[in-house]
Amino acid sequence: MTMARKNLVDPSITRWYHCISRCVRQAFLMVDGSEDRKQWIEDRLEKLTENFAISVGGFSVLNNHLHVLCRLDPDDADQWSAGEVVRRWIAVYPPKKLDFGNDKAVAGWIRQHAKKKKRVTQLRKRLKNLGWFMKSLKEPLARMANKADHCRGAFWEGRYKSIAILDTEALLATSAYIDLNPLAAGLADTPEESRYSSINQRIDHVRCKGQLSRLRAALQGSVQASELAGSMEQDHWLVPIEDRRVKDERSRAGMLETFPLGSYLLLVENTGRMFRDGKASMDAAVKDVFCRLETSIETWQKRLDRMLHTPRLRGCFFAMGNQSVQAILADRADRKSCLASKPTA
């Protein structure tokens, strides 16, 4: 039986969720019209992260499905003023009659609608809700594609899949899995060549800053270069790979402590080489990454191989340690027991 989304997504358990959405009948609808559909998804993700209290740590857009790694930031939404809530909402769903070229008219619209407390409360809830985030990502593209193809009907399968990520090793594996999906699908030979993916976005961001030399040095194992490359992610729309708040409390919240961008790219590059060539060289830099992860290259390869070559990821939770899943199941059992023991009116 399908589980209700409200029972699957709970920020008090984990803020990280791997969302997967497939085109109807798994048809190649992302490329039937034009590659612009994939670019639209990428651009839309950036706009949504600017306005929702939800951040994106990774994504890949393939021919018949997409992956998005989302982090819920509900506390951020609770701090927004009523006017800020309205401003963010109309940025995502612009009213047809509002002239956005007229700043005075836009400011007046926001002031007027910010007075409607019930509406503001409703919009605030939507802007921190994963279901509304995915709806805002998928629905507009479906309408645009149907209009372009002169047809009606569903573009996406009715329900997206969400998998709760319960520990940091599972978060790293999920991020790498998403970035390696285009390679597994035969759309690219190397991770950096995979368009419409988060790893391509991260590398392009460094390239635009003219700092590819630092990134190359980081990939050769230079700790200093890896640190500098990681600092360049602070102004990118994706969640930074490294959580640098221990070093600098003013830094944005990242994905993994003491694991900089250079180490992540090195990990993904070598993992991709495993699947392309059947093996990967174990130089000192790669060995150091796996030592810090307290795992081996063989164990990592088995995990990613199982994920990448499974037709569909199964389950509602993902953790590398069974204790994480057991804790969640125990917590849910306690909640059900509490609800069952409450007296009815």
Image (cartoon, rainbow, N blue to C red):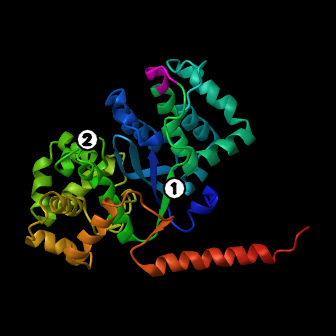
Q: Are marks 1 and 2 in contact (CB under 8 Å)?
A: no
What amino acid does circle 2 point to?
Answer: Arg
Please say whether residue 172 is one of the residues in the magenta stretch: no
* Stretch in magenta: 146-151
Residue 341 higher or lower than 90, as above or below: below
Horizontal side, residue 101 vs residue 337: left or right:
left
What amino acid does circle 1 point to?
Answer: Asp
Residue at 15% in and 66% down: 223
The percent position of residue 102, horizontal first and vertical second, equals 53, 18
Residue at 63% in and 26% down: 109
The answer to whether one can see residue 241 in this image is: no
**Which is more N-terminal, label 2 or label 1?**
1
The percent position of residue 333, horizontal first and vertical second, equals 65, 77
Q: Nearer the viewer, residue 121 or 21?
A: 21
- The residue tagged 1 is 73
The percent position of residue 30, horizontal first and vertical second, equals 37, 35
- The residue tagged 2 is 195
Quadrant of the image containing the N terminus: bottom right
